[in-house]
Amino acid sequence: MLRADYPLEARGLRKRYGGKEVVAGVDLALAPGECFGLLGPNGAGKTTTLRLCLGLTAPDAGSVHVLGVDVIAQPRRARMRVGVVPQMDNLDPDFTVEENLVIYGRYFGESDRRIRARIPDLLEFAGLSARAKARISTLSGGMKRRLTLARALVNDPELIFLDEPTTGLDPQARHLIWGRLKQLLAERKTILLTTHFMDEAERLCDRLSILDHGRMVACGAPRELIGAHIEPQVVEVYGENVSAWGEQHGRRLAERCEYSGETVFCYTGDASALVQALEHRPELRYLHRHANLEDVFLKLTGRELRD
């Protein structure tokens, strides 16, 4: 049954291109005020899922409702009530920062007077109050990303779609964007986020789903997923002949070992014996840490490179 109070609800979404099903029965239900993450390797179906939810791509099967609007039947009406930050910035280089906001606001039927009344708050939110008259070509990558986020808020949406919002940004810019997103969540905005940064997902998402080959392979709160799928402690071991060490000692001292290049990942409930043994192997280096979301991601989707 459709939850009328949910900003986004999708059921049984499917999409096939040629002979390949890129979205294979995806279900989503976002509660008001939560940040929900979509994680997955390249080609897992994340961006296609977003396009289906926005009515930019027609599904082969399934249903999508955004803020109570049937997206398949009324895609334009649904998009009028949401904000979108695309994967790549598409700001108009022929206009200033301020003009980009005004022109974008017109797409939503807003009057220039109403848009201009919102611009000071949007620029302050983006940290661009002093750059209102600046050309887009003069902005840094971080400034452009913040402006794209502010632009997505010009119609004061309740639901915001973010497709890899911090890709290509330096750590300072990423942290600033995270702060702005937390501010939106504090205002009870609802966010659907795709990201390749596991720390970003752990920091921002109340719940998330991991997609692989178009299917959801796990769903839950970040800490719940870590507890359900991964041993609590991890020891990463590096050095000469580390694979041989892993076969001889790692498998004996840890519950599970994984190999990636010149690193052995040892997963265990108690790493004390493993660490003690490594202290007597000066030719090996190691890192002892708690399990994290990246460990879950790699266990469920594999360590092989995706193109």
Image (cartoon, helix red, strand yellow):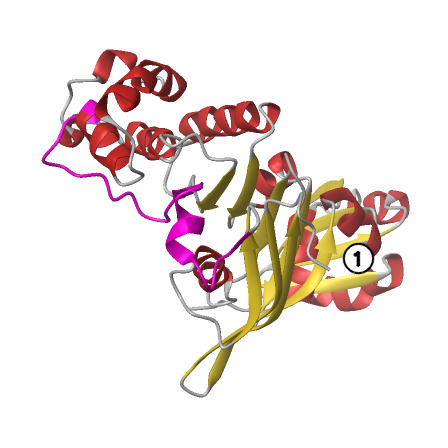
Q: Is residue 170 above or below residue 122?
A: below
Question: Could you classify mark 1 by the number of other residues whose Cα lies within 10 Å: few (under 14), some (14-19), or many (20 or more)?
Answer: some
Q: Does residue 198 appear in this view?
A: yes
Residue 148, horizontal then vertical, whole percent: 33, 35
Is residue 76 shown in magenta? yes
Which residue is more in the foreground, 167 or 267? Answer: 167
The residue furthest left is 94
Q: Quadrant of the N terminus?
A: bottom right
Question: Which three-letter amino acid code belongs to the residue tagged 1?
Answer: His
Quadrant of the rendered structure where residue 286 is? top right
Which stretch did the figure color magenta? 69-98
| Observer-nearest of 221 and 274 | 221
Magenta span contains residue 169: no
Query: Measuring 55% from the left and 69% from the top, which residue is drawn there?
Result: 304
> In the figure, residue 249 lies in which quadrant?
bottom right
Mark 1 — residue?
229
* Residue 72 shown left or right of residue 283 in the figure: left
**Can you give x and y, in whole percent of width and height, for residue 79 in the image?**
41, 48
* Residue 100 picture location, percent across and down: 21, 31
Q: Residue at x 26, y 41 (%)?
A: 107
Q: Nearer the viewer, residue 108 or 45?
A: 108
Residue at 71% over, 60% down: 218
Residue for point 80% across, 47% down: 224
